Amino acid sequence: SECETTETSQWYANKDDKGKPVCYVCYMRQLAVSRGKCSGCGKDGANTSQLIKSKLKKDEWYCMPCSVREKLAIETAAGTTCGECGTDTTSKWINCKDTGTKLCTACYDKNRLDVAAAAG
């Protein structure tokens, strides 16, 4: 493997050296390099661990931070708001089983703590 690891749960085909398998992290780095630069910030694929396909734009790839920003933009444009506090910005939306609404991460965590406290 490129990182010289000797143990992994699964080996992947090496894009550079067909006879030498690589671990998952090295495989993802090779994929990122093959995809070029991040369409959001321009970071070279060789300098990031992963490039993720855009959900909006065909043939565009984003590094993890730019991918998160794209996801937030999609959800904000869709009018997603928290059923508890009303915010339209969060790193992750969670479906609330009790109310059937979406919760921001902060309200979801608070809700979990309240449920745990009530259960004793």
Image: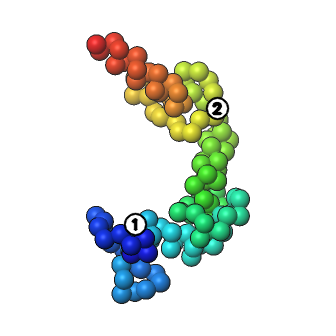
Give the amino acid at mark 2.
Answer: Asp
Q: Nearer the viewer, mark 1 or mark 2?
A: 1
Q: Residue at x 68, y 41 (%)?
A: 77
Image quadrant for the C terminus?
Answer: top left
Secondary structure type for disc 1: helix
**In the structure shown, which secondary structural element does the residue marked by tag 2 occupy?**
loop
For residue 42, say whether it is visible.
yes
Q: Position of residue 12 (x, y in %)?
A: 36, 74
Q: Earlier in the sequence, mark 1 or mark 2?
A: 1
Front residue of 38 and 48: 48
* Residue name at image x 63 percent, y 27 percent: 87
Mark 2, residue position: 88
Q: Going 43% across and 86% down the picture, which residue do you hit?
A: 17
Residue 114's disc is none
Q: Is residue 60 something that shows in the picture?
A: no
Q: Amino acid at mark 1?
A: Tyr
The Cα–Cα distance between marks 1 and 2, rounded to whole angstroms, is 35 Å
Residue 109, percent from left and from top = 46, 26
For label 1, the residue is 24
Residue 85 vs residue 33, the one in the foreground: 33
Residues at discs 1 and 2 in contact (Cβ within 8 Å): no
- Residue 6 against residue 72 in the figure, above or below: below
Residue 72 drawn above or below residue 94: below
Residue shown at 51% from the left, 31% from the top: 105
Q: Residues within 10 Å of mark 1 (few under 14, many from 20)?
A: some
- Rendered location of residue 19, percent (x, y): 36, 87
Residue 2 to residue 74: above or below: below
Instruction: Give how far across and how far down residue 44 sits, in percent.
Output: 65, 68
Could you tell whether 112 is left or right of 61 in the image? Answer: left
Q: Residue furthest right?
A: 41
